[in-house]
Amino acid sequence: MTDTINIVVQTHTLIQILLLGFITFMLSMLLTPLYTTIAYKYEWWKKQRSDSWSGGKATVYAKLHAAKHKRNIPNMAGIVFVLSVGLVTLAANLDRGQTWLPLAGMVGAGLIGFVDDWMNIRGNSAIAGMRARIKFLLHSIVALVGGVWFYAKLDVTSLNFGFGEVALGALVVFVFWFVVIATANAVNITDGLDGLAGGLLVSSFTVYTIIAASQGKYVLAGFCLSIVGALLSYTWFNIYPARFFMGDVGSFALGTALGIIALQTDTIYVLPVVGAVYVAETGSVIINRTSRKLRHGKKVFLSSPIHHHFEAIGWPETKVTMRFWILGQVAGVVGLMLYLLGSR
């Protein structure tokens, strides 16, 4: 009898988690035409960048994407999924202890990204937008406030680094800040081709849905799946040729949420594996920047992040995107296996 009750309860919980994903998907699909109408009417066009992530002029990038930037493609579509996830989470009245921190982090980082995107859209220079130092400072404030909440309110004083729990005390706040900042920037760097970041993030948040559910954090799992639902709606319109871009409002919001969820599930050692593509993208930028400084302007990759390098050697944009999706899915499975092995 007890087993039967447990099965019924688990089935009911699974249905609730899946329903959150479905509702957020449908809400995003309904909000997208409204966003599109406004974005095209008020010309929220994304400006082409003239410098590269590696520090020099983005001549290779400009050549590869010259045709794309002749089209007017709206930016800031991330507003749609941040709003959808926020509304569904608040309407469902989900457990504050599991959802308020990632939701607040997502909205806070999204607001910073929104201001940056807005300055890009309305600015007059080739690369309009918020100064990098100011953006970093504001994002750091969001991360540090989240870290203090994580330490003081959720009473987290130790974290698992893959070889067991390490007592950190107040240093948890610093680790929280580092993980959130690193993840958000890595996702932001990866968001460079039609459909690329959307497809990769679907895989990442799906893995964390499973991890959260396996820990009995069903509300957090529902939150993760609501993000997946919203991302599926976004990716439907963002695949090549993209109808719009998520902008920093989207990439910073989702990267921040992903980092926080990894911390809440105590799996930061799994995050670099699940996000291996984000790590590779960020690493390629660091390598090219370092090479330029140490080798008198010479680069290791033709263009960075590395997805542009593959374009430069002749891969069509769609091939790069789909192969990176596959790599992201494989990385997600490996990360999930690592987590399961570590939780035995």
Image: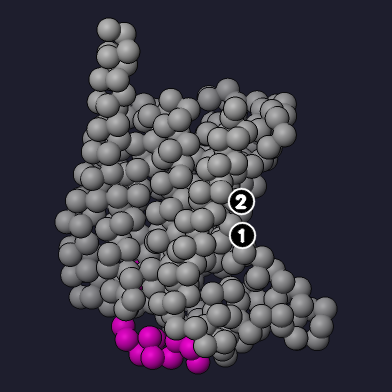
Q: Secondary structure at mark 1?
A: helix
Q: Is residue 119 left or right of residue 263?
A: left
Query: Which residue is rendered at x = 47% and y = 63% of the image?
Result: 326
Residue 53 image position (x, y, % from top left): 61, 75
Q: Locate the N terminus and report the quarter of the image it occupies.
A: top left
Q: Does any portion of residue 196 appear in the rendered image?
A: yes
Colour mapping used in the image: one colour
- Which amino acid lies under the numbered mark 2 shown in the image of this protein? Pro
Q: Is residue 237 above or below residue 183?
A: below
Q: Is residue 69 magenta?
A: yes
Q: Is residue 4 above or below residue 342?
A: above
> Which stretch appears magenta?
63-76
Residue 231 image position (x, y, % from top left): 34, 55
Q: Which mark is residue 279?
A: 1
Q: Secondary structure at mark 2?
A: helix
Q: Which mark is residue 272?
A: 2
Query: Could you tell me if the residues under marks 1 and 2 are in contact, i.e. CB atoms within 8 Å?
Result: yes
